[in-house]
Image: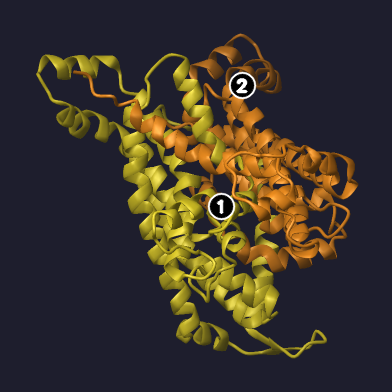
Amino acid sequence: MKKPIWLVPTLYIVFLMLPIYWLLNMSFKTTNEILGAFTLWPQNFTVENYVTIFTDPTWYNGYINSITYVVINTVISVSVALPAAYAFSRYRFLGDKHLFFWLLTNRMAPPAVFALPFFQLYSATNLFDTPLAVALAHCLFNIPLAVWILEGFMSGIPKELDETAYVDGYSFPHFFTKVFIPTIAAGIGVAAFFCFMFSWVELLLAKTLTSVAAKPIAATMTRTASTSGYELGLLAAAGALTIIPGAIVIYFVRHHIAKGFALGRV
Amino acid sequence: MAAKITNQKAWLFVLPVIILVAFNAVIPLMTVVNYSVQETFGNNVFFYEGVKWFEDVLHSERFHASLLRQLAFTATILAIEIPLGVAIALTMPQKGVWVSVCLVLMALPLLIPWNVVGAMWNIFALPEIGLLGRAINGLGIDYNFTQDPISAWLTTVLMDVWHWTSLVVLLAYAGLRSIPDAYYQAAKIDGAGSWAVFRHIQLPKMKRVLTIAVLLRLMDSFMIYTEPFVLTGGGPGNTTTFLSIDLVKIALGQFDLGPAAAMSLIYFLIVLLLCWVFYTLMMKDEDQ
């Protein structure tokens, strides 16, 4: 008799989906129904919460701000990490191991430690309350991560590739852009995915570095919860919408995601 | 691995990274060091205080209490997430369309903004309107995470298990996929049972990724802030006030710059120590 081992992952996925279902359930209810009755699915199905979010600029601007700094951060992180990761995977140079360790420590630095000095630093440089400030601040942990992942993927590629290209008469920039980058496209995709992910989920720094103009959606949610009473339905709808970008990017890297979480080092 | 070429020009390749990270890491860190040795009474007037704040923090019961809570929390979630993650990875489908389905669904919690995770669990666990809270109370168990410390603690742990076990699953799964089929066939010929296969083939092959998993979870759980802050606000009382929450309370809430900076540095040194252990283990593996 074959044991039903598929039961374990299935139960786990059900456990993962329950809170998400509850969030969706709440987002389609009216405030009265949420507070008045306990129902497993919406009795008076309404999309009003979503309509509010898509028509009120303070709400939808939050999404635009968040996406803006996440994209800027991903582009900066991956483009500066590419040459650095190449250097770490191919060359030995003075202080390379110390440098790599120093980069790593920044990935591990608790954002809470940096919240106050960041506020002062970005105020002093006149970047406070711009998407660029958050994008640059998130470089603190995303660049080390991108270097780390890319270095793992690059080290898996034999050096013979580089050598053959030089023998064939490629110059270094030509080789790097035309041969090497296409070869590690999967690694770049995974690195970009992780930068996107960690910038998207982070709130402490994003909230500290913005006030009105560049406020991220996550901060809009926390402030709404405290100022305009207990609008749970609206909060649930806003939360449900924040899951969508993540779900889209996961879909694109689904074949490489397991290897990516192992930082390209399996 | 082939020997690397020594080339000092490689520094030019890493220069942009160094500049960007240094701007974000060195300047703020120096600010913190600066505050940690000074006293201020406002108006930007500062007095040198030496190591007074460090002594204060190291002797303060409040710091000991949050550190202890932090250690207990980290130990608990590691003890649950690592075995659970490995068990799920072992039972996952190996090929076919279900692999993608499982991976995408399991990775979903990792991509939800941390405050939404907190808010979602808040709604999910509220005793009156939440599915979980209602269900537990329906079983006749008194459960209210906003008032009862034990409920709050358990809810925070459960939330972290929900949020991060998938990371362990994905890592362990990646390790398992790297085992060639020939190993399993050899084990079959030798008549090895499933426990022997796990003990002598799967576990050694997963050692490397599990090291990453344990240490990533160790360090990330050490900086947990947003999820418990949104779920419980650190309460009831101080039950779920972990290091980061306590630090932000002191720094941005009370604006006690000196003690907050000293605490930041001590906190950072603890994390740095863990990081160093992590790095040494990783590099030892790499050299083999």
Task: Compare residues B216 and B284 and report the one nearer the observer.
Answer: B216
Instruction: Please state the horizontal and vertical placement of residue A132, each as a whole percent of the image.
Output: 81, 48
Write down the colour of chain A. Answer: orange
Residue A144 percent location from the top left of the image: 59, 45
Residue B16 seen in render: no
**Residue under circle 2?**
A185
Question: Circle 2: is it few (<14), some (14-19), or many (20+) Cα within 10 Å?
Answer: few
Query: Could you say whether the residue bearing mark 1 is in a helix, strand or loop?
Result: loop
Residue B136 in the image, given as x and y percentages of width and height? 43, 54
Rendered yellow, the chain in question is B
Viewer can see residue A135 = yes
Above or below, A20 relative to B103: below
Q: Judge whether B61 appears above or below B170 on screen.
A: below
Q: Quadrant of residue B109?
A: top right
- Count neighbours of disc 1 (C-alpha within 10 A) and say few if under 14, some if 14 to 19, many if 20 or more: many
Q: Position of residue A75 (x, y in %)?
A: 73, 35
Q: Which chain letter matches label 1?
A: B
The image quadrant where one finds the N terminus of chain A is top left
Task: Quadrant for the C terminus of chain A, please.
Answer: top left
Q: Residue furthest top?
A: A168
Kindly identify the residue that appears in the image at 66 percent across and 14 percent down. A170
Q: Amino acid at mark 2?
A: Ala
Q: Residue at x 69, y 34 (%)?
A: A245
Identify the residue shown where x is 71% and y is 67%: A117
**Residue identifier under label 1:** B130
Q: Chain of mark 2?
A: A
